[in-house]
């Protein structure tokens, strides 16, 4: 290479290094955002046709009172909830959310958002969501945001490694002098193939192939310091230009007894194509999930029956199958809740409808109606449950089947 070209390359490298340092310094001073958020609402509400009753429900309230429930919004001047002809889409974020354990699992949904000022075509951003469950820390799958130049460097590294492997294969073909070996076989058949191959082997090519094969792992790490599709990475998104990045993350975990709260935080780093970490992105503020379960609906009325008390304890501990095995012969509200918790909806519904009406049974029927998509019945059962026991007004926000209709029809004030 000519000296002038070498100097130009060196100058370009110095300029690039200076630019990187300048941008990293700016990031460290401004601290652009990257974090986890909870989308509170992201919904388009269509025009309401009040004359036809569209988007409204007629339900029976307390003492047979007829109620008309409709979608509504808060008037900014009066503060009252009023029907409106059109609602604009809105995106709100919160730092905590109530989630429900259902059938032994918990679905955590959150959004990772990354500012465009953290991005550069030659960088890769690596983010690690971490879940805190009591004393346990669980590393969730990572998320990568890869610049287009960074990806090109990765692909070039794979190409170099492929040439390296081709060289090993070529040396392997040259280890034996095939032409002389075939001529030898034509004259001396009493020599074994192994002895003949040793005699006509080319030691130089054999040693070089073995050496390169032994060093292949190290050479791969040199060529590809940041492999594509690394284990533990959920998504590796390549961006050709800097832009605000958002990714909706869904994580399903197994429920366990006594788990009432989970937190998720996000940390990350900026990496160059040679695998060097350029910057540590500070850990985000946490988002918190408060967990409810249908086992929490268990009726803890004191009874002398030891087996029954054990069944209720199992129900509250979310050990639903064991609880059902104990409680099913009793055919009472707790047996119905065990069926409800396991998703045996038809059996739970038949049992609840056969029981004397109570706020607890009405609330359970509201959950079942919500699962069936019968909003009118779900609202009706819920309002009757709240009328009999006000605490179910707060419980409703914990169960997704009820929370959905509370938000849709603004039932907080009923």
Image (cartoon, rainbow, N blue to C red):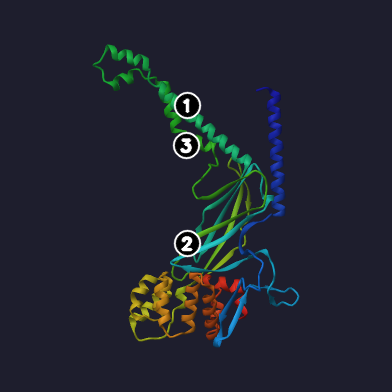
Which residue is nearer to you in this view: 153 or 380?
380
Task: Please name the residue shown 56% across and 37% down the image.
Answer: 155
Tag 1 residue: 167
Position of residue 90 relative to residue 368, above or below, is: above
Between the residue at mark 2 and the residue at mark 3, the CA separation in whole angstroms equals: 35 Å
Please identify the quadrant where the C terminus is shown. bottom right
189 sits to left or right of 127: left
Alpha carbon separation for disc pair 3 and 1: 15 Å
Mark 3, residues whose alpha carbon is within 10 Å: few (<14), some, or many (≥20)? few
Tag 3 residue: 217
Between 315 and 197, which is closer to the camera in this rendering?
315
Q: Is residue 196 left or right of residue 141?
A: left
Closest to the camera, between mark 2 and mark 1, is 2
In this view, 325 is above or below 238: below
> Toward which corner of the image does residue 77 lie, by quadrant?
bottom right
What separation in Å lies between label 2 and label 1 (alpha carbons)?
47 Å
Residue farthest to the right? 77
Upstream in sequence: badge 2 or badge 3: 3
Q: Is residue 168 above or below residue 29?
A: above
Mark seen at residue 253:
2
Mark 2 crowdedness (10 Å alpha carbons): few <14, some 14-19, many ≥20: few
Q: Position of residue 52 (x, y in %)?
A: 63, 72
Where residue 288 is drawn, which disc sits there?
Answer: none
Q: Quadrant of the N terminus?
A: top right
Residue sitting at the far front:
52
Residue 398 visible in the snapshot: no
Label 2 secondary element: strand
Question: Viewer-proximal residue, 17 or 83?
Answer: 83
């Amino acid at each position: 290479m000519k000296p002038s070209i070498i100097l130009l390359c060196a100058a370009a490298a110095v300029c690039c290094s200076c630019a990187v340092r300048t941008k990293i310094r700016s990031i460290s001073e401004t601290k652009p955002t990257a974090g986890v958020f909870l989308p509170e609402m992201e919904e388009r509400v269509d025009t309401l046709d009040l004359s036809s009753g569209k988007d409204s429900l007629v339900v029976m309230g307390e003492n047979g009172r007829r109620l008309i429930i409709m979608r509504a919004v808060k008037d900014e001047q009066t503060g009252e909830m009023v029907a409106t002809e059109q609602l604009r889409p809105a995106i709100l974020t919160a730092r905590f959310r109530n989630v429900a354990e259902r059938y032994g699992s918990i679905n955590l949904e959150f959004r990772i958002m990354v500012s465009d000022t953290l991005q550069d075509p030659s960088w890769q951003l690596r983010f690690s969501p971490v879940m805190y469950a009591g004393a346990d820390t669980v590393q969730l799958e990572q998320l990568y945001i890869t610049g287009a130049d960074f990806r090109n460097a990765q692909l070039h590294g794979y190409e170099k490694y492929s040439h390296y492997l081709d060289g090993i294969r070529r040396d392997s073909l040259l280890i034996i002098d095939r032409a002389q070996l075939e001529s030898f076989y034509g004259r001396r058949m009493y020599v074994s193939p192994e002895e003949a191959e040793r005699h006509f082997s080319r030691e130089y090519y054999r040693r070089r192939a073995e050496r390169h094969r032994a060093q292949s792992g190290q050479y791969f790490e040199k060529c590809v310091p940041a492999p594509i599709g690394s284990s533990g990475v959920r998504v590796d998104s390549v961006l050709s230009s800097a832009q605000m990045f958002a990714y909706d993350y869904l994580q399903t975990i197994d429920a366990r007894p006594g788990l009432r709260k989970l937190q998720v935080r996000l940390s990350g780093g900026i990496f160059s194509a040679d695998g060097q970490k350029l910057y540590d992105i500070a850990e985000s503020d946490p988002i918190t999930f408060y967990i409810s379960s249908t086992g929490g609906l268990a009726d803890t009325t004191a009874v002398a029956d030891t087996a029954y008390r054990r069944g209720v304890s199992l129900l509250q501990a979310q050990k639903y199958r064991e609880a059902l095995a104990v409680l099913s012969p009793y055919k009472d509200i707790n047996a119905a809740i065990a069926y409800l918790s396991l998703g045996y909806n038809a059996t739970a519904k038949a049992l609840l409808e056969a029981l004397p009406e109570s706020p607890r049974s009405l609330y359970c029927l509201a959950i079942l109606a919500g699962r069936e998509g019968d909003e009118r019945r779900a609202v009706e059962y819920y309002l009757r449950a709240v009328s009999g026991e006000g605490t179910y007004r707060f419980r409703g926000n914990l169960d997704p089947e009820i929370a959905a209709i509370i938000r849709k029809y603004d039932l907080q004030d009923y």
